[in-house]
Image: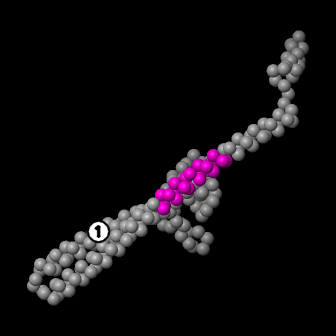
Amino acid sequence: MGSEGTQDAGTDRAESPDRPTPGVADAFRELGDTGRATWAAGKEALTAFHILFKADLSLARSAFGRSLAFTAVAIVFGASAWLLLMAALVAWLSLDVGWTWPISLLVCGGGSLVVAGLAGWFAMRYFEHTRLQATRRQLARMGIGELSAMMSGAGSSKSAKEDADGVAAATNGEPVKKGMGVDITPP
C-alpha cells in the first residue's frame, strides 16, 4: 500500500490542474521576461551613469570658471604687488631716509601678495574638480580606462572611492606608472 500511495501521489501531481507541465512556449516567455528585466536594469544603470556624468561635468565646468576667475585675480594682484614692491625698492634706494613712502608701499605690496597667494590657492582647490573624479572611478569599476586594473569589479562590496584611496595608500603617494612610464592621474 505504501508504494501504491506514493505512485498515486506522483500521478496526481503530474495531472493536477493547479500545476501544468511547463512547455517550450512558457520557457520562451520566461526567457523574454528575463531579457526585458535585464534590458530595464541596464537602461537604469545607463541612466544613473548619465546623470552622474552630467553632474560631474557640471561641477567641472563650474570649477573651471571659478578657477579662471581666481587665476585672473591672482595675476592682477601679483602684478600689482610686483609693481608696488619695485616702487618701494626704488623709493627706498632713492630717498634712503624717508621711510614713509617705502613703508606705505611695502605694506600695500605685502597685502597684494597675500591676496594673490589666497587667490592662487583657491584656484588650485577649484581646479581639482575639473578631473571628473567620480566618473573616472565608475568607469574604472566597469573596466574602462587606465585605472581599471587597480579597481575592484562592478560587483564588489567596496566603493570606488575606497579602491582609489587604497591605490593611493599602496603607492605611498608616489605616482602610479602605466606602460611607457607615464604617470596615471589618480581619481
Q: Position of residue 10 (x, y in %)?
A: 86, 20
Residue 96 position (above or below residue 32): below
Determine the residue located farthest toward the left in the rendered image: 97
Number of residues whose C-alpha sits closer than 10 Å to that of mark 1, classed few (under 14), some (14–19) or many (20 or more):
some
* Badge 1 element: helix
Residue 31 showing in the rendered view: yes
Q: State the extent of the magenta-drawn residues as a range.
A: 42-61
Q: What residue is shown with label 1? A: 115
Q: Position of residue 100 (x, y in %)?
A: 12, 78
Residue 119 counted in the magenta span: no
Q: Residue at x 44, y 62 (%)?
A: 63
Q: Nearer the viewer, residue 94 or 58?
A: 58
Horizontally, residue 105 falls left or right of residue 26, namely: left
Q: Position of residue 56 (x, y in %)?
A: 51, 56
* Quadrant in the picture for residue 81: bottom left
The N terminus - image quarter: top right
* Quadrant in the picture for residue 150: bottom right
Q: Residue at x 24, y 79 (%)?
A: 84
Residue 46 counted in the magenta span: yes
Residue 62 position (above or below residue 19): below
Q: Main secondary structure of the magenta part?
A: helix
Q: Residue at x 86, y 32 (%)?
A: 23
Q: Position of residue 95 (x, y in %)?
A: 13, 87
* Quadrant in the picture for residue 31: top right
What is the three-letter code of the residue carrying label 1?
Val
Determine the residue located farthest toward the top in the rendered image: 1
Horizontally, residue 182 falls left or right of residue 92, namely: right
Color encoding of the figure: one colour
